Amino acid sequence: MKNAQPTQEGKAVTTKTVFSRETSISNSISADAGIVWALLTNAADYPRWNSTVVSIKGEIKQGQTIELKSTLDEKRTFKLRVKEFEAEKRLVWGDAQGNRTYSLSKKEAGGVRFSMTEKIGGPLFPLFAGMIPSFDESFEQFAADLKKEAETIQKSRK
Amino acid sequence: MISDELSTEFESFQGELKSFVLRMTASVQDAEDIVQETYLKARSKINTFRGESSLKTWVFSIASNLAKDLLKSKKRWPETVTDICREEALGNRQFFQEAMRIRETSPQGKFEIKEHIAFCFTCVSKSLPLEQHLVLLLKEVYGFKVKEIAQIINNTEAMVKYYMHVSRSRMIEVFDHRCSLINKEGICHQCTELNGIFNPKQKAQEEVAKIEMARAATDKSKEELFDLRMKILQELDPFESGAAELQLHHLEHNRRVMEKFLEENEQGRPIQRK
């Protein structure tokens, strides 16, 4: 299977197979990696800037479990474990059904390239695949919100 | 740098340092203790000062660490601190008797709305997470630069900018919701209410009109109104102003109420009304 490779700036791409689905997005952010990382790892602050998140409880730290409520399904709380936490580079959280990976790479000219991928799947995936909404719109909103907030903070007074 | 130079420079910003620690701790006793301890620590470690920052920045970092050590085990105050404390004060005759005595006898006992605005911010900003509170005060009230704050809190400039932004946004939102001076639908009128008690002959609207932030409420953005609120704090020394004794008495009351409130809430019991 080919990985979902986002080609257009800030536009989500989804690829599907019988047993999995993967959505990815990528965009450039004119802000320090530290600012983007702070936004991605401060759980309680998400609802302030991210219109796709209702709430995140817990601490986004290696090995911790967080409880996430998304606008995709506000009634449902996802219990997710932080599986990888490499400051200003890579963050992965997920459960048995799948993982969400955030990556940051610093650009030579300044700013960062932000990428986000979520892969869900498994042997039972075909049974519930039809019930899972598309992530595309939510991903695009997430990436746009992150870019807007990080660039606003970057421009704040010295 | 030798100790004598430290003493001279320390003296030049000691007032700012003490007011900063007071606004962090909301306790006169803690502010005095921390300032004294900061001086002793700076004196004993002056040989390690390499001049990578200004002496003032270095000393503020010592004081910030001492304040953090004191506060990190304590719970943060709720945003509704002034509502909770108002309820308690209304049932506390002793508090008002002492306030009236200060009002009548102390040269630092007059009540002014702008002084109460600064006092109110000191209480409400204690609802911010500790690090955000620290950064907000250092930046908005004491005028440190991002780079200097990064040195003071030993963190990156990116994190300082993030804390600054989040704490400002939060306080703008809280005051926009609460403060009737900047929002007609604001739920808190405590400053004008207290003005009526302490200055019964004054007309509250005339007093409010003296406050630039209140005059600008309909024309300026929330951001600009917050800057005007910060200007009030910048211009007031809580230990030296004409209302210092009265406001410090009020602050001590609120701190005690909050300590009791947080302790009782931690134990799952409601606060006892007098």
Image: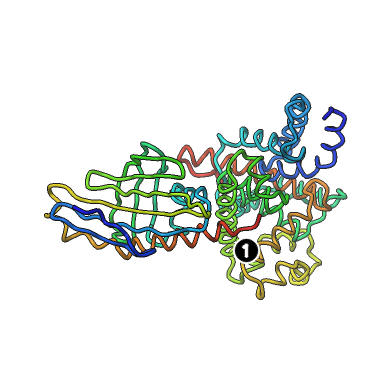
* Display colour scheme: rainbow
Query: What number of labels is visible?
Result: 1
Q: Residue at image x 84%, y 50%?
A: B108
Q: Residue at image x 73%, y 55%?
A: B233
Q: Which residue is situated farthest in the front direction here?
A: A108
On the image, the x and y values in percent for residue B194 come to 72, 59
Callout 1: few (<14), some (14-19), or many (20+) C-alpha neighbours within 10 Å? many
The answer to whether residue B202 is above or below residue B236 is: below
Q: Residue at image x 25%, y 51%?
A: A119
Q: Which residue is situated farthest in the bottom direction here?
A: B219
On the image, the x and y values in percent for residue A30 come to 51, 58
On the image, the x and y values in percent for residue A56 come to 39, 50
The answer to whether residue B222 is above or below residue B77 is: below
**In the shown orientation, is residue B5 left or right of residue B150?**
right
Q: Which of A108/B212 is in front?
A: A108
Name the residue beneath numbered marker 1: B179
Q: Which of B235/B184 is in front?
A: B235
The kind of residue on which mark 1 rests is Cys
Query: Is the C terminus of chain A in the top left, top right, bottom left or bottom right quadrant?
Result: bottom right
**In the shown orientation, is residue B204 left or right of residue B123?**
right
On the image, the x and y values in percent for residue B99 come to 76, 49
Q: Chain of mark 1?
A: B
Q: Secondary structure at mark 1?
A: loop
Q: Residue at image x 53%, y 44%?
A: B271
